[in-house]
Image (spheres, rainbow, N blue to C red):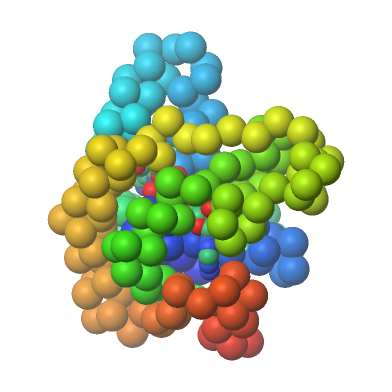
Amino acid sequence: MNIILLGPPGAGKGTQARRLVEERGMVQLSTGDMLRDARTSGTEMGKKVAAIMDAGELVTDEIVIGLIDEKLHQSTGGGFIFDGFPRTLGQADALDALLARNGQSLDHVIAMEVNDDALVSRITARSTCAKCGEVYNDITKPIPSDGKCTVCGGTEFKRRADDNEESLRTRLMEYYKKTSPLIGYYHAKGQLRWVPGLGEIDEVAGSIAKILG
Ligand code: AP5
Ligand code: MG
């Protein structure tokens, strides 16, 4: 089964994707995570990507489609969770073509609905484990009092460079301008499913599980 998790910054895409990996053995393809890896590479491309991400703007379609193409070649089985991809109509068309080339298709596009106020407070309270990427939140999912990641035992946690109010404003604008048209696109194709993203993490996971069956 192949699914897209669609939603604004802070909707909970990464959090739910990691659960699906754990519970169903699916493969998470997060273009945000791939780009954060690329920016540490020290290459010219990495430097350009870093500046764009920090400002909260979208990286070019060409770069992200190339990253996804590469991963689709490498990974097999389990089904894919596209987390933060596609983000433009051009990326959505490219994904259809890439999946068709591999004899695959999309099963569900899960749109996560969260209001802007909740997104701001979620993102400004987020941190992640530096070792395994587990996502924490100062308010709703704090780092355990012993300072160890619940998944891998790592003791170093980091905050993202784009998790500040100014970049977040741009990220939200980019979402509404360039990504939200995908809601109409997938609705027209009969693939869109809405999930209320404001509930607790377990509740949201339950809503997604009902859709996936
Ligand atoms: P990306 O990394 O994809 O960031 P994003 O879309 O802005 O989304 P986030 O990762 O911030 O949020 P999330 O929905 O994953 O929420 P999370 O689960 O962490 O992209 C970053 C940048 O890369 C982009 O701005 C762009 O520059 C570039 N990029 C990436 N993909 C691209 C593409 N396809 N095309 C072009 N450019 C691209 O949760 C957030 C917080 O809330 C956490 O603290 C979590 O613990 C908490 N939380 C989660 N669920 C709940 C809940 N139910 N209740 C309470 N708290 C919750
Ligand atoms: Mg994410």
Q: Is residue 28 above or below residue 79?
A: above
Please name the residue shown 48% across and 12% down the image: 42
Q: Is residue 37 above or below residue 197?
A: above
Percent position of residue 52, x then y: 29, 29
Q: Which of 16/74 is in front?
A: 16
The answer to whether 46 appears left or right of 155 in the picture is left
The answer to whether 127 appears left or right of 95 in the picture is right
Q: Residue 102: tell me if it is visible.
A: no
Percent position of residue 59, x then y: 30, 36
Percent position of residue 28, x then y: 59, 54
Q: Is residue 139 above or below residue 153?
A: below
Q: Which of 52/95 is in front?
A: 52
Q: Is residue 157 above or below residue 29?
A: above
Please name the residue shown 49% across and 61% down the image: 12
Q: Residue 42: tell me if it is visible.
A: yes
Tell me the quarter of the image containing the C terminus: bottom right
Residue 156, quarter of picture: top right
Q: What number of labels is visible? A: 0
Please name the residue shown 43% across and 62% down the image: 11
Please name the residue shown 43% across and 46% down the image: 124
The answer to whether 77 appears left or right of 90 in the picture is right
Residue 7, quarter of picture: bottom left
The answer to whether 127 appears left or right of 189 in the picture is right
Percent position of residue 45, x then y: 37, 19
Tell me the quarter of the image containing the N terminus: bottom right
Q: Which of 140/95 is in front?
A: 140
